[in-house]
Image: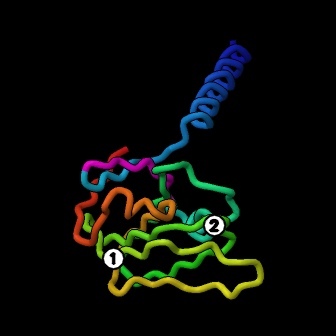
Amino acid sequence: MRKIVIVLLFVLLGVVAAYYLRHPLGAKVKIGDHVIPVELAVTEDEKQRGLGFRPSLAPDHGMLFVYDHKEQFNFWMRGMQFPLDFIWIDGGTIAEITPNIPAPKPGEQLRVYTPKSEIDKILEVNAGMVEKYEIRVGDTVEYTN
């Protein structure tokens, strides 16, 4: 009986693992009428890696960096292979936008990007998305999963 329970437990764990490999945990950010599926960067390791060392980001998707306090956080494009728009967020409002940040060229010194005011989140999206969807400073941001 004990072996059957152990086998069933492993089968259940396998099914759950397979599900989350196909449907990773994420969230959605709504700005105006546009909903953006996002990956979350919550841990320090996730924030350090960000979108670096990837060949691309799915169209109309993003990565949301979430902090537990407000600060003028520094961001750079280490390991980036494609350009981004940075959307700096204070609570539920867009505080600032830094559009069309180019990927660094090999050997180029990394530029540091810092918002003018304290924020608690930053949304990184493919360059041009801010313009495409007419995202503006002052727009309301809603979060769902």
The residue at the point 40 percent across, 50 percent down is: 36
Amino acid type at mark 2: Arg
Q: Is residue 91 magenta?
A: no
Locate the N terminus by quadrant.
top right
Q: Quadrant of residue 87?
A: bottom left
Q: In which quarter of the image is residue 15?
A: top right
Instruction: Kindly indicate whether the residue at mark 1 contacts the one at mark 2 (C-beta within 8 angstroms).
Output: no
Q: Is residue 32 left or right of residue 96?
A: left
The residue at the point 46 percent across, 52 percent down is: 38
Residue 17 lies, in percent from the top left, at 63, 33
The residue at the point 29 percent across, 75 percent down is: 95
Q: Residue 116's mark? A: none
Residue at the spot of label 1: 96
Residue at the spot of label 2: 49
Looking at the image, is mark 2 or mark 1 earlier in the sequence?
2
Residues drawn in magenta: 33-40
Q: Which residue lies furthest to the top in this view?
A: 1
Residue 110 lies, in percent from the top left, at 64, 84
Tag 2: Cα neighbours inside 10 Å, few (<14), some, or many (≥20)? Answer: some
